[in-house]
Structures are given as C-alpha cells and as structure tokens.
Image (cartoon, helix red, strand yellow):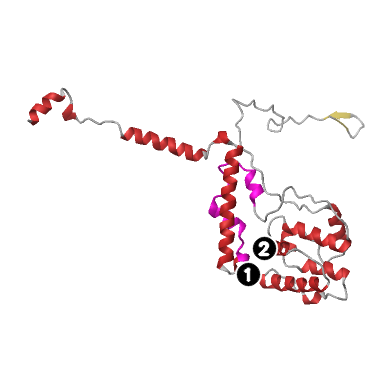
Amino acid sequence: MAAAGLGGELLTLPTVPKSPSLAPRPAAPMRGRPKKCLVYPHPPKRSRVSPSVLRWLQGLDLSFFPRNINRDFSNGFLIAEIFTVHYPWDLKLSSFKNGTSLKVKLDNWAQLEKFLARKKLRLPKELIHGTIHCKAGVPEILIQEVYTLLTHREIRSIQDDLVNFTDYSYQMQLPLVPRSTASKSIKDNIRLSELIGNPNKLNNERKVEFLFLLQMLQRKLSRKLNPSNGDNPLKEMHMKRAGKRSSDSMKPIRSEAWKGDPEEHLCDGL
C-alpha cells in the first residue's frame, strides 16, 4: 500500500497479514447421509382477516388498532367502538370498559346484544361465545360478520376449513404419535373462563363427551387414511418388547442337579 510522504515521495507501507481465523474456509463435507427429521405444522400465528376488512378497520380511526385479534376483540370494547362510529346516537362508548376480566367481557357483550336486538342486527351467539373465550379462528369470522352487517358488502371467506371451535384440523395434520391425548384435548379446547362463566355440570359434561367422540372419529379416520402405519408405532414397539420378554421367561431352566441322565435321578427318588 502506498502513501505520500513529507517530501512528496511515495512510501510503501507494509501490508497487514490476513488472520487465518478471518479467512474464508471451505465448508466441511458432510459425512454419511443427512439425518431425516419430521417437520410438524404449527398453528397459524397470523390473522386470517381479509385485507379489505383490515383497510376498513384502519379507516375507522379506532382508539387502538388490534394487533392480536383473539385478545383485542374478546372483551367487546373494540366491537362497541366500531358500532358507535356508525350509530353515534344509539350507543355510548363510555358505558363499556376495556378490561380483561370475565365479568367485564360478559357485561360488555350483554350491552352489545341488547343494542343489536334493538337495531334488529344479528350476530350468531356461537361466534360471540367463541370470541369471549378466545377460540382460535372465531374472532376473525365475527369481525367479518360485523363488516358485512355495517357495509352491506359480501367478502370471500379465507378460512381454510370449517371452524368447529376445536383444534381438530390442526391435529389431523400431525403424525399419529405427537397428537393430543384425550385429557390434553379437553385441556386445550375447554377454557377456564368457560367453566367459570357457565358452571352448569350438564353442559360441561356434554362438551367433554363431544371432545371424546371427536377424538375417536379422528383416530378412526386416521387409521383408514393411513392403514400401513398401524394403530400406534409406540404401541407396536411395546408389544414386541413384551413378547420377547414373555418368550424368554417361558424357556425351560435346568438346575445343576439335573445334569446327566434323568432316569438316574428318578431311580434315586424311588
């Protein structure tokens, strides 16, 4: 490298040696075959709300924009604010609370249901129930229904499957082994807020029976779709090991006293 000196002469500066750690090294060749790994699908983390609905929400100038659809619409405050934009004289936002407790959610939605009944607007109770308890995929459908009611525009649904308020479609995408058991399915699909809000034992027992029936149908369907995989790979491994142990235990064992001719021992006994 050259630099200008005081007398205008060019001075050559020594080059800095390259560090061996910084020099690019060729990638080491892979030994053997690459390991195969199972890739499981994950639940959708992004909202499935239509772009036209999102643009409509941005144009309403709400107090805050919903970042988490399941959480932000569950208490009904944003839904009430949307209706106050279109019906400012019939609904007061000051009577609603922006809270997270179950009592606040039920009070807000009770006021909204009374308002909808007066205006002869209909929102399915199943959607309201699923939105309160943060069921996956339900708040997206509810906000699309609100969009259709207020704008009188039909939008194309972008849901992949029919929503039955459970994780059935996600479980069907998994292999047989990592799927939820019956107890795990009940914990995942029945919220604590549902049990607190509706402590009726009969209704809760019906929900549990429905989840049991849904899992039985899911297992039968997976067996028909994948007959070569068997019932359960872990169960087959366990049965093979159990059979090997039982065959080992059935082998005859001779003691040292019985070595030789068995007739001699019989004579000794007589």
Q: Left or right: 243 with respect to 49?
A: left
Q: Which residue: 59% across, 56% down?
A: 210
Q: Is residue 182 magenta?
A: yes
Q: Position of residue 120 (x, y in %)?
A: 82, 70
Q: Which residue: 11% across, 28% down?
A: 266
Q: Is residue 71 visible?
A: yes
Secondary structure state at the residue bearing disc 1? helix
What distance separates the C-alpha of mark 2 from that of mark 1?
10 Å
Three-letter amino acid code at disc 2?
His
Q: Position of residue 56 (x, y in %)?
A: 87, 59
Three-letter amino acid code at disc 1?
Gly
Mark 2 and mark 1 in contact? Answer it, CB < 8 Å.
Answer: yes
Secondary structure state at the residue bearing disc 2? loop
Q: Which residues are magenta?
A: 167-194
Q: Left or right: 7 with respect to 22?
A: right
Q: In the rendered image, which residue does mark 2 sit on? A: 133
Q: Is residue 212 magenta?
A: no
The quadrant of the picture occupied by the N terminus is: top right
Q: Which residue appears farthest toward the top when viewing the image?
A: 261
Q: In the rendered image, which residue does mark 1 sit on? A: 197
- Residue 124, relative to residue 18: is it above or below? below
Q: Which residue appears farthest toward the right when viewing the image?
A: 8
- Residue 13, relative to residue 135: is it above or below? above
